[in-house]
């Protein structure tokens, strides 16, 4: 390694370490396929690297590091799209180097965004809507919440009201964490309507009861993250009308349609949840969820310009022309917006409807098949109740007593590659622990069947590794129809106080007992 001096423009020498010819030769000619032939020491990842490395080695090192992650297609925890057609992939690759904000250089991407907004406005039955692409629903929600707050502030100012009061937003305790960010970052008081153990949404009655003169908006979730249930937007809208007549409050609704805004228009076209309801003034949608695009693209739409205060819209001409923006970031990639446009043109209403029907059919199959295993109670909605295409389920109480819970089931499934989250429900239903499987386009009915078989194997393993009393085992055998004569000692030493166990009746794992 030699030290080399470069002259900077101000004539101060800059010291650069050069590689020797030997080092260069080694790097150039060995060209190792695997990093282990090149690297004898781990990467120092907390210091800025001094030397260069061959591209192939760097590629391998990073690829190896990522190899330990879950397989995206088997990640049933995420709402986010993991597969698109090769033509969409191609368009994405071709627009990876486009900065969306450079409107004058790349006007086609601005036109594409505007077309997507118009198409969504049409889908959501708006006559005069405006909106923008965002990185996802979280950014869209921050913008929707900001618009609520600014409208309220401007109204108060116009009315000559100056004293400091904190505005509030009423929502279910099952709101996504991005709403908590909104409340925290923009100083809005959250008024949570807690769930109950038999109702996982906020009802219209409870929502209006929590409103007062400083309520700047209410949230209706079209598919809660926890269980996929839809809130009754039409009921909330009617209850707000009544409240307005009784108390004179003018409170509007933001619909959090992160997932549902790309499901409901196709699966339940007659369900009124959108701008057909006059109190709905803004809607967010995640293009990267059931909008069928890779992460990160989302959308926020306003009923009309009246609901997007002008004071929140920025104009600049740094990039050559007058640009209008209402986003939290300046630069961002254009490829996801292009990909969204691809899906709209490619699929249209017919294509989205077919895909959502398939997702729904898989969800219905899963709900039934999981229930039929005998181990679970399915808590997501079932036909004919409108729902997101997913299955949320929990262990039946008799299995809960065995010393394992939903987290152990998730853990066993992970060993087969499936990622299924286990979690507790939102306040006040935290006593309920659930597992949730999202039925995205990528989860075919065949994969869903394999999943159910793997769930059964996981349950057999768990039941085979936990102890039952003989009576419990006899009952379980009866309930689940276990057959066979296998004998397997799971635990040979019984601790004082533990129930006696007849080892001959402990089921073997692996489906044979
Ligand atoms: C109901 C709901 N709102 C908002 C979000 C946040 O969306 P994003 O991940 O697109 O920012 C989610 C994400 O799952 C969600 O389920």
Image: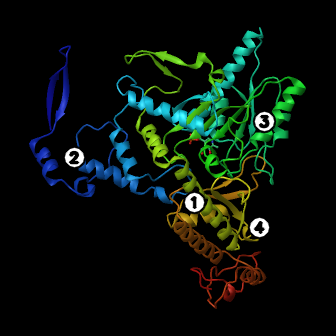
Instruction: Find disc 2 in the rendering and name its residue.
Output: 54
Please report the residue visible at 61 percent of the width from the left and 42 percent of the height from the top. Answer: 258
Can residue 210 be seen by looking at this rendering? no
Q: In the structure shown, which secondary structural element does the residue marked by tag 2 occupy?
A: loop
Q: In the structure shown, which secondary structural element does the residue marked by tag 4 occupy?
A: helix
Which of marks 1 and 2 precedes in the sequence?
A: 2
Label 1 neighbour load within 10 Å: few <14, some 14-19, many 20+: some
Which of marks 2 and 4 precedes in the sequence?
A: 2
Mark 4 and mark 2: span between their CA atoms?
57 Å
Q: Residue at the far right: name it.
A: 246
Tell whether circle 4 marks a residue whose Cβ is less than 8 angstroms from ligand 1.
Answer: no
- Name the mark on residue 358: 1
Label 4 neighbour load within 10 Å: few <14, some 14-19, many 20+: few
Q: How is the image coloured?
A: rainbow
Label 2 neighbour load within 10 Å: few <14, some 14-19, many 20+: some
Can residue 360 be seen by looking at this rendering? yes
* x, y percent for residue 181: 63, 33
Compared to residue 136, the image places residue 410 above or below, namely below
Mark 3 and mark 1: span between their CA atoms?
31 Å
- Name the mark on residue 397: 4
Q: Quadrant of the C terminus?
A: bottom right
Instruction: Find disc 3 in the rendering and name its residue.
Output: 237
Q: Residue at the far left: name it.
A: 21
Place residue 376 in its image quadrant. bottom right
Tell whether circle 1 marks a residue whose Cβ is less than 8 angstroms from ligand 1.
Answer: no
Which of marks 4 and 3 precedes in the sequence?
A: 3
- Name the mark on residue 390: none
């Amino acid at each position: 390694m030699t030290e080399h001096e470069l002259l900077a423009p101000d004539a101060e020498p800059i010291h650069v370490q050069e590689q020797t010819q030997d080092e260069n030769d080694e790097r150039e000619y060995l060209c190792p396929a695997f990093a282990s032939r090149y690297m004898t020491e781990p990467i120092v990842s907390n210091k800025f690297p001094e030397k260069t490395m061959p591209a192939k080695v760097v590629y391998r090192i990073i690829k190896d590091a990522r190899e330990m992650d879950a397989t995206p297609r088997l990640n049933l925890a995420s709402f986010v799209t993991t597969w698109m057609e090769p033509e969409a992939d191609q368009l994405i690759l071709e627009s990876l180097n486009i900065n969306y904000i450079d409107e004058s250089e790349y006007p086609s991407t601005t036109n594409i965004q505007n077309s997507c907004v118009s198409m969504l406005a049409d889908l959501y039955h708006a006559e005069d809507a405006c909106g923008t692409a965002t990185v996802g629903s979280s950014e869209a929600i921050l913008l929707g919440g900001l618009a609520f707050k600014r409208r309220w502030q401007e109204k108060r100012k116009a009315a000559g009201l100056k004293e400091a009061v904190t505005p509030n937003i009423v929502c279910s305790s099952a709101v996504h964490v991005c709403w908590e960010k909104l409340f925290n970052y923009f100083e809005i008081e959250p008024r949570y309507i807690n769930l109950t153990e038999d109702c996982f949404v906020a009802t219209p009655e409870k929502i209006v009861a929590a409103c007062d003169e400083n309520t700047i908006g209410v949230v209706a979730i079209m598919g809660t993250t926890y269980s996929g249930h839809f809130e009754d937007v039409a009921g909330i809208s009617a209850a707000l009308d009544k409240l307005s007549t009784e108390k004179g409050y003018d409170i509007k609704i933001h619909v959090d349609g992160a997932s549902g805004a790309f499901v409901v228009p196709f699966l339940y076209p007659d369900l009124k949840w959108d701008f057909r309801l006059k109190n709905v003034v803004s809607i967010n949608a995640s293009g990267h969820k059931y909008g069928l695009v890779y992460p990160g693209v989302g959308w926020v739409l306003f009923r009309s310009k009246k609901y997007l205060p002008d004071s929140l819209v920025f104009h600049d001409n740094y990039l050559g022309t007058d640009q209008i923006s209402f986003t939290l970031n300046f630069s961002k990639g254009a490829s996801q917006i292009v990909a969204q446009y691809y899906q709209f043109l490619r699929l249209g209403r017919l294509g989205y409807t077919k895909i959502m029907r398939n997702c729904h059919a898989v969800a219905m199959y899963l709900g039934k098949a999981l229930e039929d295993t005998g181990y679970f109670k399915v808590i997501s909605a079932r036909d004919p109740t409108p729902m997101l295409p997913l299955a949320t389920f929990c262990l039946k109480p008799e299995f809960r007593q065995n010393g394992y819970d939903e987290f152990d089931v998730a853990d066993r499934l992970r060993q087969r590659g499936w990622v299924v989250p286990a979690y507790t429900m939102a306040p006040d239903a935290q006593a309920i622990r659930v597992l949730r499987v999202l039925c995205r386009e990528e989860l075919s009915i065949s994969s869903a069947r394999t999943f159910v078989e793997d769930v059964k194997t996981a349950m057999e393993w768990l039941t085979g590794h936990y102890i039952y009393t003989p009576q419990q085992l006899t009952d379980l055998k009866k309930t689940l129809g276990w057959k066979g004569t296998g004998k397997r000692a799971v635990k040979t030493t019984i601790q004082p106080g533990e129930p006696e166990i007849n080892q001959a009746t402990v089921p073997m794992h692996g489906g044979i007992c």
